Amino acid sequence: MIKINKSSTAPEILRNEGKDKRRALCEKYDSGSREFSFDGNIYRDDTVKEELMRAQNGKCCFCEEKFRSYDVEHFRPKGGFRQKNGDTLEKPGYYWLAYEWDNLFLACPICNQRFKKNLFPLADPTKRARNHHGALSEEEPLLIDPSDNPGNYISFREEICVSVGGNIKGNTTIEILGLNHEVLIEKRKDRLEHIKDMFEILELSEEPDTLITTDKVKRARTFLDSTVKDSAPFAAMARAAINSNFNFA
Ligand SMILES: [Zn+2]
């Protein structure tokens, strides 16, 4: 995961229609109703998806794989939530955040549908905001918000995701999102091997009587520079590898 920098102003449709829908949902709750429906045409509007796509550089907000397909993901689940796998779905969910810019991201179907689903664990579930009168600031989510700095919680040992200092938020995020699932590890391993090859070319080029051509050095450097950019797949892993000179802590 890398930090996602969304535009500070929400797309217009969220500020207008989204706001009206939110008001209606809150009034419905206050009048005693606990059944909510949501208008996907608003939070899945092209303007919303395009801005998220730009902010996320065409990558999943969780696993950093380049998109082949994607879902609009609600960080705090709108319809219902689970504290942990196996729990029954608790309703309502965070209905008042269904059209909130801060709560929206794009995620790949594997992260969203296979792993995260409706899970939204908190350090202390009794502090959960159960309706729009509750205080989100009281919650301590155990999932990393992609708008925070994920590097504070998660790093890499080679292609394996690790929790920084064993922190619980990092560990829970890795587990719930399946950030070390087999297929993902294989993909990151391929990427890392390529990075390592280029890194070794640079090292060899420093040796006396090197046979590495300046052209090859240039290509290796350009490739390595590209792997740490926000737009690169698995950029967080590449940064951990390159910044540590492949001496993982
Ligand atoms: Zn993903």
Image: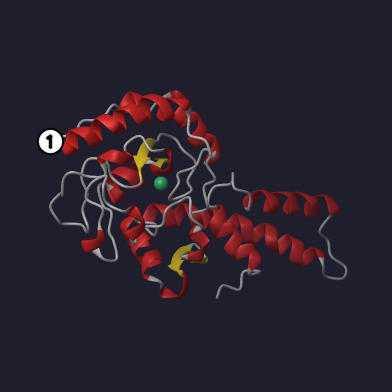
Q: Is 62 displayed left or right of 207 in the figure?
A: left
Instruction: Check disc 1 and give the amino acid type.
Output: Ser
Q: Quadrant of residue 178?
A: bottom left
Q: Is 78 displayed left or right of 9 in the figure?
A: left
Please state which of residues 68 and 141 is positioned toward the viewer in this rendering.
141
Q: Residue at x 36, y 57 (%)?
A: 137
Q: Tag 1's secondary structure? A: loop
- The answer to whether residue 57 of the structure is visible from this angle is no
Q: Classify mark 1: residues with Cα within 10 Å, few (<14), some (14-19) or many (20+).
A: few
Quarter in which the C terminus is drawn: bottom right
Q: Residue at x 27, y 41 (%)?
A: 78
138 relative to 208, above or below:
above
Q: Is 63 displayed left or right of 131 in the figure?
A: right
Q: Residue at x 59, y 58 (%)?
A: 238
- From the top left corner, tell me how far across and down residue 214 is, in percent: 85, 54
- From the top left corner, tell me how far across and down residue 184 is, in percent: 42, 53
- From the top left corner, tell me how far across and down residue 21 is, in percent: 30, 28
Q: Residue at x 33, y 44 (%)?
A: 112
Residue located beneath label 1 in the image? 33
Please state which of residues 168 and 155 is positioned toward the viewer in this rendering.
168
Return the residue found at the far right. Answer: 209
Please state which of residues 100 and 44 is positioned toward the viewer in this rendering.
100
133 relative to 195, above or below:
above
- From the top left corner, tell me how far across and down residue 213 is, in percent: 84, 55
- The answer to whether residue 61 of the structure is visible from this angle is yes
Mark 1 beta carbon near ligand 1 (under 8 Å)? no
17 relative to 80, above or below:
above
Q: Quadrant of residue 27?
A: top left
